Image: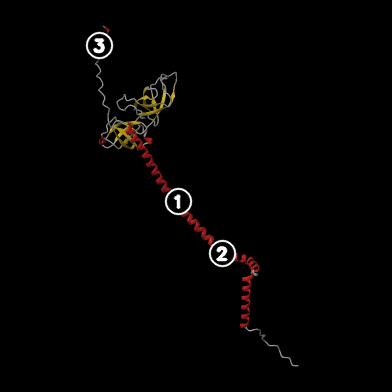
C-alpha cells in the first residue's frame, strides 16, 4: 500500500469563509450582550484591570494641565488683586471726598442755623490758613474790605464764638481766636447769671476764667455766654463750658479752666458779624483841678 507524503502547506477554510463566520459570531454576541448583558461582569473586570494603565497613560497630560492651571490661576489672582487694590484706592479716595463733603455740608447747615438766630447782618467766610507766628492763635479768612469787614468784628461758627477780626486787608482778614493769650471776652454764667471774663492762655482747647472768688457760684459743666458789655460781642453767644475748678482756701481766687465751644480745628467756614453796635460815647472824665475843687467844696 502506497503512502502519500503529507502536504507541505496545510490548508484550512478559506479567508472569506472565516470572515463570514467571525462576522456572524460577532453579530450574535452583540445581540446577546445587548439583550441579556451577559458580558457586563467581564467588561467590568477588564475595566478594573485597565484602570491603572489608563491613569498612568493620562498622568502626563493631567500633570501638564494642572501646572498650566496653577500658573494661570496665580496670574489671574495677581491680576484680580491688583485690580481690587486699585479699586479700593479709588473707592477710598471717593469715600474721603464724600466724608469731606458731608462734614462741610453739616458745617454750612450749622452756620446757616446760627445766622438765622443772630439778628445782626453777617457774612460767611472760608478759613484759608493759619498765621505764620506759632506763638499766636490767629488765622486768615477769604473776606476783607470788599465784604465790608471791619477790625473788631466778632467771628463765630455754629457752636459758639471763635474770636474777632484784628486786621483787615483788601481781600483777606486776620482773625484772632479767643484762646490767644492777648484776648479776653466778657461772659455770663447761664445758670447763675454771674458775670466774669475769660482769658486766652495761648493753648488750643482751653480758656482761663480768672479773678473769681473761691466761693463763687460756678460749677463744672456751666455754660458761659457773651455778656455784651464790651460792645464787641452781642450778648448771648455761646463761648465756653467749665471743665475744671480748683478751690484752695489759701488763695484769694479759684483756678477755673474752660473749654471753648467753637474752634477752627473742627471748622472750615466761619460767620463774621458785619454790623457794629452803635453805643453812646463814653462820658468825658473831669480834669484833676476840677476834681480837687469838688472835693474841697464837699469837705467844707
Asked if 268 appears above or below 193 in the picture, the reply is below
Q: Quadrant of the C terminus?
A: top left
Mark 2, residue position: 60
Residue 130 screen position, x and y as percent: 34, 36
The x, y position of residue 223, in whole percent, is 39, 27
> Is 295 placed left or right of 224 in the picture?
left
> Relative to the observer, which residue lies in front, 229 or 209?
229
Residue at the front extreme of this rendering? 35
Between 154 and 32, the one nearer to me in the picture: 32
What distance separates the C-alpha of mark 2 from that of mark 1? 36 Å
What whole-number distance in Å separates the C-alpha atoms at marks 3 and 2?
124 Å
From this view, report whether residue 37 is shown above or below residue 70. below
Q: Residues within 10 Å of mark 1 (few under 14, many from 20)?
A: few
Q: Hey, which quadrant is residue 59 in on the image? A: bottom right
Numbered disc in front, either 2 or 1: 1
Q: Residue at x 50, y 58 (%)?
A: 71
Q: How many marks?
A: 3
Is label 2 in contact with label 1 (beta carbons under 8 Å)?
no
Identify the mark nearer the N-term, 2 or 1: 2
Seen at 62% across and 73% down, the residue is 31
Residue identifier under label 3: 294
Q: Which picture quadrant has residue 51?
A: bottom right
Q: Residues within 10 Å of mark 3 (few under 14, many from 20)?
A: few
Q: Which residue is mark 1?
A: 84
Residue 111 position within the rendered picture, expressed as x and y whole percent measured from the top left: 34, 35
The image shows residue 50 at horizontal and vertical percentages of 62, 67
Estimate the spatial distance between the alpha carbons at disc 1 and disc 3, rounded to whole Å: 90 Å
Which quadrant would residue 44 be assigned to in this image?
bottom right
Instruction: Find numbered disc 3 in the image and state the secondary structure of the residue it sits on.
Output: helix
CB under 8 Å between callouts 3 and 2?
no
Quarter of the image where the N terminus is located: bottom right
Amino acid at each position: 500500500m502506497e503512502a502519500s507524503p503529507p502536504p507541505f502547506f496545510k490548508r484550512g477554510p478559506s479567508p472569506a469563509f472565516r470572515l463570514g463566520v467571525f462576522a456572524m459570531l460577532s453579530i450574535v454576541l452583540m445581540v446577546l450582550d445587548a439583550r441579556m448583558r451577559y458580558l457586563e461582569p467581564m467588561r467590568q473586570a477588564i475595566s478594573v484591570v485597565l484602570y491603572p494603565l489608563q491613569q498612568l497613560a493620562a498622568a502626563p497630560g493631567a500633570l501638564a494641565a494642572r501646572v498650566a492651571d496653577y500658573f494661570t490661576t496665580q496670574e489671574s489672582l495677581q491680576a484680580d488683586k491688583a485690580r481690587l487694590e486699585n479699586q479700593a484706592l479709588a473707592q477710598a479716595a471717593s469715600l474721603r471726598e464724600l466724608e469731606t463733603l458731608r462734614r462741610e455740608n453739616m458745617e454750612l447747615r450749622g452756620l446757616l442755623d446760627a445766622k438765622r438766630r443772630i439778628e445782626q447782618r453777617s457774612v460767611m467766610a472760608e478759613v484759608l490758613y493759619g498765621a505764620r507766628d506759632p506763638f499766636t492763635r490767629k488765622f486768615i479768612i477769604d473776606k476783607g474790605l470788599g465784604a465790608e469787614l471791619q477790625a473788631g468784628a466778632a467771628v463765630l461758627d455754629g457752636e459758639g464764638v471763635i474770636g474777632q477780626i484784628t486786621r483787615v486787608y483788601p481781600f483777606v482778614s486776620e482773625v484772632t481766636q479767643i484762646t490767644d493769650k492777648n484776648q479776653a471776652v466778657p461772659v455770663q454764667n447761664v445758670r447763675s447769671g454771674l458775670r466774669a471774663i475769660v482769658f486766652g492762655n495761648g493753648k488750643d482747647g482751653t480758656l482761663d476764667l480768672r479773678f473769681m472768688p473761691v466761693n463763687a457760684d460756678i460749677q463744672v459743666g456751666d455754660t458761659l455766654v457773651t455778656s455784651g458789655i464790651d460792645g464787641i460781642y452781642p450778648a448771648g453767644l455761646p463761648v465756653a463750658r467749665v471743665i475744671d475748678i480748683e478751690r484752695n482756701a489759701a488763695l484769694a481766687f479759684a483756678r477755673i479752666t474752660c473749654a471753648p465751644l467753637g474752634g477752627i480745628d473742627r471748622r472750615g467756614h466761619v460767620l463774621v458779624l458785619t454790623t457794629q453796635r452803635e453805643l453812646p460815647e463814653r462820658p468825658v472824665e473831669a480834669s484833676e483841678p476840677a476834681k480837687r475843687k469838688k472835693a474841697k467844696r464837699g469837705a467844707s
